[in-house]
Image: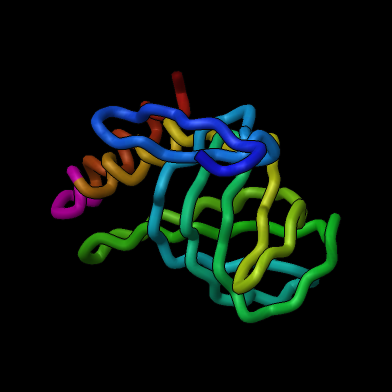
Amino acid sequence: MLSGGRSQKVGMARTKKRWSERRSFRRLDFQAKAFLVFCNDRAPCTIRNISNTGAFVDTNRMYELDDEIELLISFTKGTSELSLRIPGKIARIAGSGVGFASPHMNINQILQLELMLDCNQENPKELVSEFCKFFAT
């Protein structure tokens, strides 16, 4: 066990976390190409993980803490494309990426929209119908 840390059993594996690394919301590995939109400039990035409060993204662009920014996630399947534009801010700068924070993040909705697109990629009319039902509930 690391100094100042604790062991946490996850399934069959053991992971070690420092007390300072505990989070209110669980992070989910989520690899996706996206864009960070800042002052009408779209910079490509790669999402590494998401939570219900934000995401960590790899990017080559430089940002400042608290920069108001949007995360643009695009799901493309066949000829169909679905884009989500989520407003937020830069909450952390670390190594090759930044922590994006937003009260508008919802892992379940993002995964459900991705699944909806995946299941209806061959039938755009059905996709539109499912999309409308999703937001009507």
**Dominant SS in magenta:** loop
Depicted 29 relative to depicted 41: above or below: above
Depicted 113 relative to depicted 30: above or below: above
Is 21 positioned to the left or the right of 89 in the image? Answer: left
Q: Quadrant of residue 71?
A: bottom right
Residue 67: image location, x then y, percent: 83, 60
Depicted 46 relative to depicted 26: above or below: below
**Residue at the (17%, 49%) spot, across then down:** 123
Q: Quadrant of the C terminus?
A: top left
Q: Nearer the viewer, residue 98 or 129?
A: 98
Q: Nearer the viewer, residue 45 or 10?
A: 10
Examine the structure image and report whether residue 72 is included in the region drawn in magenta.
Answer: no
**Residue at the (85%, 55%) spot, across then down:** 66
The reply to whether residue 104 is visible in this rendering is no
Is 135 positioned to the left or the right of 121 in the image? Answer: right
Q: Which residues are magenta?
A: 119-124
Q: Quadrant of residue 4?
A: top right
**Residue at the (56%, 43%) spot, across then down:** 2
